[in-house]
Image (spheres, rainbow, N blue to C red):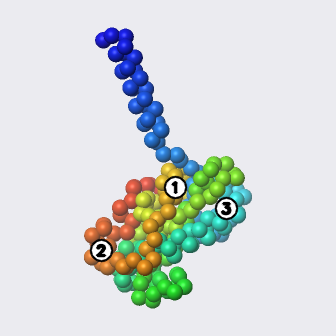
């Protein structure tokens, strides 16, 4: 191999390594809470989030819940996907919603510090219970073993889910054909304590 060939090969290997490193997704401090009060309680105790960030993120999670929660054509289908007692009518969750469309109840929320540090901007996602007792976000991009704890998560965990408002609610057949709500997400084992 000539000197020039060696330099080209080294340059290609170096560029490939740099490209792969650049593709690695940014991770952020994140925490899951079953409710707003749990987040407020943790805000003063070594938490990466302030009480104000907890409130803002919870309000955002509630708004996303109304906009993007999965919708089902019957309470029975919803409870098959999320567990008994884990569903309610769309009318109860959203003003102007239908009493014949059902959606899971908000079972917590995920908050992430998108800019790092205490002054960073918080982003959030609603969490829903799955039929196997785990928790998933509205986009179904992740499944967690619990709805409380802290971890480093990829920023993609906070991607805004598609709206389900006005869309045809899932039937038993469509929910089954999709593998059930929460089954399509990446397998996460849960949060640390």
| Residue 6 on image: x %, y % | 36, 15
Q: Earlier in the sequence, mark 1 or mark 3?
A: 3
Q: Categorize mark 1 by other alpha carbons within 10 Å: few (<14), some (14-19), many (20+).
A: some
Any part of residue 45 in sight: yes
Q: Categorize mark 3 by other alpha carbons within 10 Å: few (<14), some (14-19), many (20+).
A: many
Residue nearer the viewer, 183 or 19: 19
Residue 182 vs residue 193: left or right? left
Farthest residue, direction bottom: 99
Q: Earlier in the sequence, mark 2 or mark 1?
A: 2
Q: Which quadrant of the figure has residue 83? A: bottom left
Rendered residue at 48%/45% (across/down): 25
Note whether 154 is above or below 16 in the view shown: below
Q: CA distance from mark 3 to mark 2?
A: 37 Å
Q: CA distance from mark 1 to mark 3?
A: 20 Å
The numbered dot on residue 53 is 3
Farthest residue, direction front: 4
Rendered residue at 43%/26% (across/down): 14
Q: Which quadrant of the figure has residue 49? A: bottom right
Q: Secondary structure at mark 3?
A: helix
Q: Read off the residue under disc 2.
A: 174
Residue nearer the viewer, 46 or 178: 178
Q: Read off the residue under disc 1.
A: 191
Residue 117 vs residue 84: left or right? right
């Amino acid at each position: 191999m000539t000197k020039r060939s060696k330099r080209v090969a080294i340059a290609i290997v170096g560029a490939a390594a740099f490209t792969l490193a650049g593709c690695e997704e940014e991770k952020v401090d994140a925490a899951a809470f079953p409710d707003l009060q749990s987040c407020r309680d943790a805000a003063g105790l070594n938490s990466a989030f302030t009480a104000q960030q907890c409130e803002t993120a919870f309000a955002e999670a509630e708004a996303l819940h109304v906009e993007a929660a999965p919708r089902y054509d019957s309470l029975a289908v919803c409870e098959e996907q999320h567990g008994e007692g884990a569903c309610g009518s769309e009318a109860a969750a959203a003003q102007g919603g239908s009493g014949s469309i059902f959606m899971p109840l908000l079972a917590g929320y995920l908050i992430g510090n998108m800019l790092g540090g205490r002054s960073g901007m918080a982003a959030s996602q609603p969490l829903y219970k799955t039929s196997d007792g785990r928790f998933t976000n509205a986009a179904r991009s992740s499944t967690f073993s619990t709805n409380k704890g802290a971890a480093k998560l990829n920023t993609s965990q906070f991607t805004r889910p598609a709206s389900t408002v006005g869309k045809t609610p899932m039937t038993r057949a469509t929910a089954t054909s999709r593998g059930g709500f929460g089954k399509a997400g990446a397998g996460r084992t849960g949060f640390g304590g």
